[in-house]
Image (cartoon, helix red, strand yellow):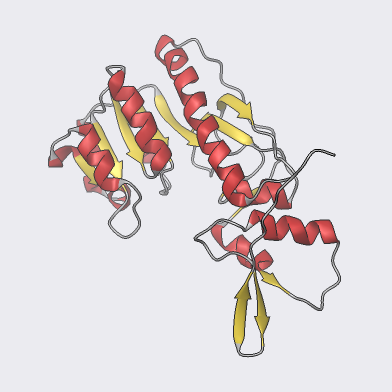
Amino acid sequence: MRYIYLANGRVSTEILRWLIEHGQNPAGIVVHPHGKDKYRDELIAMSRLSPADVLEGPKLATQEGIDWVSARKPEWLVSISFGYILKPVVLAVPTKGAINLHPALLPYNRGAYPNVWSIVDRTPAGVTLHFIDPGVDTGDIIAQRAVPVEATDTGATLYARLEEASVTLFQETWPVLLAGSFQRKSQQPDGTFHRVSDVEQIDRIDPNQHVRAGDLLDIIRARTFPPYKGAYLDLPGRRVYLRLELTEENK
């Protein structure tokens, strides 16, 4: 199995380690540039690839990047927490396809911050392995796993469970991909989509605005994700950030 690994973040390191342990070494790896990267050095070291077999994400939009991908003759492109949109000319290179692991139960919460919007919009949460097409998280579904949203969840705790489910789903589904025994499922046209900037619309809390208490609590807990700042109040001469601590006890 020849694949190019497009990666960023902790989940991508766990999955790459698992692939290598099972004898599946990448033919190349694409990482985020310095300053926009998470676990870049760990991914490169783990891959044991030469510098010539490592590419930075923005170069995929150039002829140099297209040639680099083509030269490695991949069967698959495997995208894990990778933050760059792939052009159709790149998607056409792998002989079997390009796949992405998205921490949402598609078609809900395409795009950014699925953990936040599953709480704020009360949409189903989960993880999905899907084919990449020219849209954003709109390709055919290969496999999914639902993750319940608990009353005590914050953005951070839900994110952690989505990460865990992502690794498990990939490990369960990869052998199916190798065997070619999977079925593609088209996504329904409904669902939801959010951009990175959409959280700006909910982060500023107006203390004079009348809102349902549950909606306000959902925003604050969804944006509770230390060390990120999250929701806030603008007061005279200062800004106050809000975090919610949730505990439960048996009645």
Residue 124 drawn at (x, y percent):
71, 38
Residue 117 drawn at (x, y percent):
67, 50
Is residue 75 placed above or below 224 in the rendered structure? above
Is residue 196 placed above or below 205 in the rendered structure? above
Q: Which residue lies at the image location 59% right of the left edge and 64% below the top edge?
A: 230
Residue 81 is left or right of residue 151, and the answer is: left
Quadrant housing residue 241: bottom right
Residue 13 drawn at (x, y percent):
35, 36
Residue nearest the viewer, comparing 147 with 66: 147
Residue 56 drawn at (x, y percent):
27, 49
Is residue 121 placed above or below 94 in the rendered structure? below
Q: Is residue 66 visible?
A: no
Location of the C terminus by quadrant is top right
Q: Is residue 79 visible?
A: yes
Q: Which residue lies at the image location 77% right of the left edge and 62% below the top edge?
A: 216
Residue nearest the viewer, comparing 96 with 230: 230
Residue nearest the viewer, comparing 48 with 133: 48
Residue 123 is left or right of residue 196, and the answer is: right
Q: Which residue lies at the image location 34% right of the left edge and 53% below the top edge?
A: 37
- Circle count: 0
Location of the N terminus by quadrant is top left
Q: Which residue lies at the image location 55% right of the left edge and 66% below the top edge?
A: 229
Quadrant housing residue 26: top left
Residue 230 is left or right of residue 246, and the answer is: left
